[in-house]
Amino acid sequence: MQREIALCQPVVAGVSEGYALVSSEPFSFWGDLDPKTGSIINPRSSLFGESVKNRVFVYPGGRGSSTTSAILLEAIRCSNAPCAIINMQVEPIIAIGILVAQEIYDNVVLPVAAVSEEAFHRLQTGDYLLVDTVVGKLYKREPGQQVKGQT
Amino acid sequence: MKLTDEEQRMLDGQYGKAVSMAMSILTKLGQIYDAEEMMPVTQVHIDSTFFQLLGDAGLEFVARLVDCEAKFCVPTSLNPSARDIERWQEFRVPLDFAEKSRRLEQAYLRMGAIPTWTCAPYQNGMIPCFGQQIAWAESNAIAFANSVIGARTARYGDFADICAAVTGRVPKFSLHIPQNRSGEILLRLQTPELIDFGDDSIYPVIGYIAGSLAQERIPVIEGIPNTVSSDNLKALSAAAASSGAVALFHVLGVTPEASTYEDAFQGKELRQIIDIGEEELLTARRNLSTVNEGKVDLVVMGCPHASFIEVKQLNQLLDGKKIARGVELWVQTNRVVYHWLKEAGLLESLGLSGVKVTTDTCNLNWPRDIWDNWGFRLLVTNSAKWAHYAPGLTGLQVIFANIQNCVKAALKGEIRGS
């Protein structure tokens, strides 16, 4: 079963799915994440010790360092990046990391989207989400189903 | 997006592959943020200077630009490098690490950057003018340039900075547009008459609160006296850009776009007011430390890079005394300040006290193995930015303290809870 749960404003186009990791705190990839493992290393973060790898990473927006672009790019290279990013406000710093990844590597799919505050608060850690920023929709579904349009 | 004929030629590759690749990335960024056109910038500050943070992927991107013989077409300053270029051995930096750093340093110099190697280029180096359109990365420098100087930059990150330096263009969006620079939230210091503004550590604490309350919005801060110094605003900028995504703040009656309420909010309706009282200031100060006492291994100052005045104050507080055995006291700064310290005889006096002055770098970015080699457990700093990032990046416990208590901790080798 697949259920549309929210509209989203596409920032980086793509289709991806995974379990959601939701945080109510803003996030800085530099200082908060180790790109070599995908783990959150900031002991002050409520997500300390969690991994963003292959998760639909949902957090309100960025904070802190402008080195975030580089850390995100390195996480992509090491296959430790989230499979999708959902914010209320998407910073250019996030978009640039992915644009550069797409420039130097083939087949980089990491959809990024902005959602309304109301939709943001409906998303929960553990939800299995399909993020489709080509059509601008978020779906909640069961894991293991075929992605729409794939054969 | 509407491109000029010249910009179209840049994109089409008439000026080489590097310009074309950089222009392609920047125009895509512009499309994402609905920019209608590109615009020229006349200065760039590059943050992508730590080879260990760029990772293999980032280094590949830079290498590609070098291979295409990329040249920076506007004055371009550089953030700190991964190592103290002259004294790296003194700081136990391994040879292979220094060598990798040297290669990235050379790459930027070949492209035509100015070897400023500082995170505070607005104090010594490339100081922009009011209203100047620039493309800066390095979160503290972005906040300072926009807020304190009134230059105009978006919150650029790694790679966007390099692309801007190669093309001299950015999308016309975000804080480049004057209408996007109005205040969005008012933060009032309650009872400012009870606040000790003579204690420099109040400014990073205010910045830390402002960042966490404002997040990506533009805060207007009310209650800071107009006697505030450039160093105080530097500390405030770095703190606000650590706890929040603050690229611009206004200080009523102090910063250039906020001489009045009307200016600061550009006549727009005020949507939110938050009062900051004694309780909030105390909590923020407490949150910057992970413990409140212990045996001190390291005292760090100069984040962002220390000014001459800050180092002079440190020397006065030390008053010729030697720091405790087993304690390191590091001051991070740039070569301009270093030269002045030498000329003024301060470097010698600091050396006799046991202080190590380091240039060109920021040790916060060291990999864990260098930290492990030093064997530190507890560091004390007067920088909210260091205090914010050090627990995650270095694995050390941290105490945030004002410069007077930093010096006491260095002299005694311990800090006691209050």
Image (cartoon, helix red, strand yellow):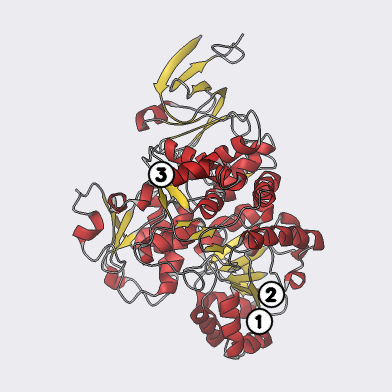
Secondary structure state at the residue bearing disc 3: loop
**Which residue shows up at 43% across the image and 23% down it?**
A136
Q: Residue type at mark 1: give it.
A: Ile
Q: Relative to B94, does residue B180 appear above or below in the rendering?
A: above
Secondary structure state at the residue bearing disc 2: loop
| Quadrant of the image occupied by residue B297 | bottom right
**Which residue shows up at 59% across the image and 42% down it?**
A72
- Residue A64's disc is none
**Which residue shows up at 27% across the image and 64% down it?**
B252
Q: Residue type at mark 3: give it.
A: Thr
**Which residue shows up at 75% across the image and 73% down it?**
B90
Closer to the camera: disc 1 or disc 3? 3
**Residue pointed to by mark 1:** B323
Query: In the image, residue B234 lies at what x, y percent?
Result: 45, 67
Q: Earlier in the sequence, mark 1 or mark 3?
A: 3
Q: Residue type at mark 2: give it.
A: Val
Discs 2 and 3 lie in a common subunit: yes
- Asked if the residues shown at circle 2 and circle 3 are in contact, with their CB atoms under 8 angstroms apart, the answer is no
- Res B241 visible: yes
- Res A26 visible: no
Quarter of the image where the N terminus of chain B is located: top left
